[in-house]
Image (cartoon, rainbow, N blue to C red):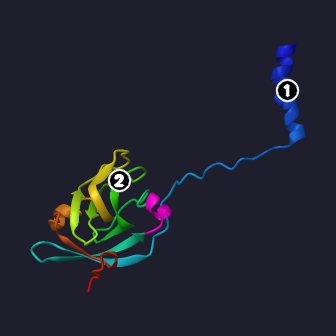
Amino acid sequence: MRRRLFLALPALVAPMLGTVTIPAARAQTGPQPRLPTEPLVIVTRDGKRHEFIVEMALSPEQQTLGLMFRPEVKPNEGMLFDWGAPRESTMWMRNTITSLDMVFINADGTIRRIAERTVPLSLATVESRGPVRATLELAAGTAERLNLRPGDKVLQRVFGTAPQ
């Protein structure tokens, strides 16, 4: 008898206390709305200019969601993650359903490192391997198609070199 009363106690007390609702954390299930865009140019070591229109991920919330759930990234588009100051950049592909090239950019606008054709949905980290001011995500294969390399120059206002 004692055991039945103990098990029934929560059911008896709950109506007296009322129902307490605890809001669940909202899980992201789709892409964030398109972010404001700005021009960006990459100048390769042979002087070729490659123009892009990039979404600007500036807030921690925008940066956390990035390109998650986006079915594609167009050839001359991307997303620039401005960290505000040089720091180690560690990215992943959680909920990112399309492969990307990740371009890690120093504070002076030079490309530090390129991680090509990252694996969709992977939780493995992709690191800048040193402090960078920003990370640029492009459609997979862009770095190879345009022959981008570390040392190439990125022109964008966050590096003090707005494209002309």
Q: Which residue lies at the image location 14% right of the left edge and 65% below the top edge?
A: 147
Q: Which residue lies at the image location 65% right of the left edge and 48% below the top edge?
A: 24
Disc 2 and disc 1 in contact, CB within 8 angstroms: no
- State the extent of the magenta-drawn residues as a range: 58-65
Q: Amino acid at mark 2?
A: Thr
Q: Check residue 9 in the rendering and tell me which mark sits there, or answer none.
A: 1
- Secondary structure of the residue carrying numbered label 1: helix
Quadrant housing residue 36? bottom left
User: How many numbered circles does the render carry?
Assistant: 2
Q: Residues within 10 Å of mark 1 (few under 14, many from 20)?
A: few
Quadrant housing residue 86? bottom left
Q: Residues within 10 Å of mark 2 (few under 14, many from 20)?
A: few
- Secondary structure of the residue carrying numbered label 2: strand
Farthest left residue in view = 46
Q: Which residue is mark 2?
A: 90
Rendering coords of residue 103 (x, y %): 26, 62
